[in-house]
Image: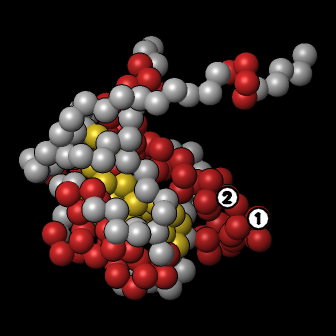
Amino acid sequence: MSLEIFYNRVSVRRYKPDPVPDDLITKILEAAFQSPSAGNIQPWHVYVVKDKGLKERIATCALNQSFIMEAPVVFVVCAIPEKSASVYGKRGEQLYCIQDTAAVTMSILLASTALGLGSCWVGAFDEHLLRATLQTPKGFIPVAIVPIGYPQVSTRKPPKMSVTKACTYLL
C-alpha cells in the first residue's frame, strides 16, 4: 500500500479552464462518502457547483477569494447537526457532525489528488451569506468550500510539522 497520496496533496489555487468530467466528480464523491461518521449517521450534504455566476457569488462569500470562481467545479460541504443530535444529543450536534464533515472534506481532497486534480480546503467565508447564496435548507451548516480542477501550475508543498514536534508517546 502506498501512502504517496498524502505527500502529493497540495492546496491548489490556480486551475486550468478545462472542465472536470462528471464521472470524475461522481468518483470523488463516492470515495468521499466512504468516510467514517459517528454511528454511521453521515450528517453531510455536498453542493456541486459548476454555474459561473454562482461560483462568483461563492467567491464573494469567501472574502473575495477569486481563485474559487476560476475552478471548474466547487464543492460546498455542509454539516447537518440535527442528524447527529438525534442520536448523540448536544455532543453530536456540536462536535461529531463537524468531525464527520471534516472527514468527508479531507476525503474529497485526497480523492481529487488521486485522480490528478487539484483542490483547496477553504474555511474562510461568511456562513450566513453562503447559506443564503445556496438557499440551503434550515439546519445545513456550510463547513468547507472545495474548488477542484486541473492545476494550472505546479504547487510546492510547504514544510509540515515533524512527528517528534507534534506527538507525545506515552509508553
Q: Mark 1 touching mark 2, by CB under 8 A?
A: yes
Q: Please indicate whether residue 87 sits to the left or right of residue 126 in the image.
A: right
Q: Whole-percent x and y of residue 130?
A: 41, 77
Q: Is residue 69 above or below residue 153?
A: below
At horizontal 23% and vertical 63% (from top left) the residue drawn is 69
Type of residue at label 2? Tyr
How many numbered discs, if any? Answer: 2
> Residue under circle 1?
91
At horizontal 43% and vertical 15% (from top left) the residue drawn is 2
Q: Quadrant of residue 86?
A: bottom right
Q: Is residue 60 above or below residue 69?
A: below
At horizontal 43% and vertical 82% (from top left) the residue drawn is 129
Instruction: Choose between 43 and 149: the one closer to the eye.
Output: 149
Q: Whole-percent x and y of residue 100?
A: 58, 54
In what element is the residue under mark 1?
A: helix
Q: Whole-percent x and y of residue 84?
A: 65, 66
Instruction: Choose between 63 and 100: the one closer to the eye.
Output: 63
At horizontal 49% and vertical 59% (from top left) the residue drawn is 123
Q: Quadrant of residue 161?
A: top right
Q: Is residue 89 above or below residue 136?
A: above
- Residue reaching furthest right? 171
> Residue under circle 2?
96
The reply to whether residue 34 is in sight is: no
Type of residue at label 1? Arg
Q: Quadrant of the N terminus?
A: top left
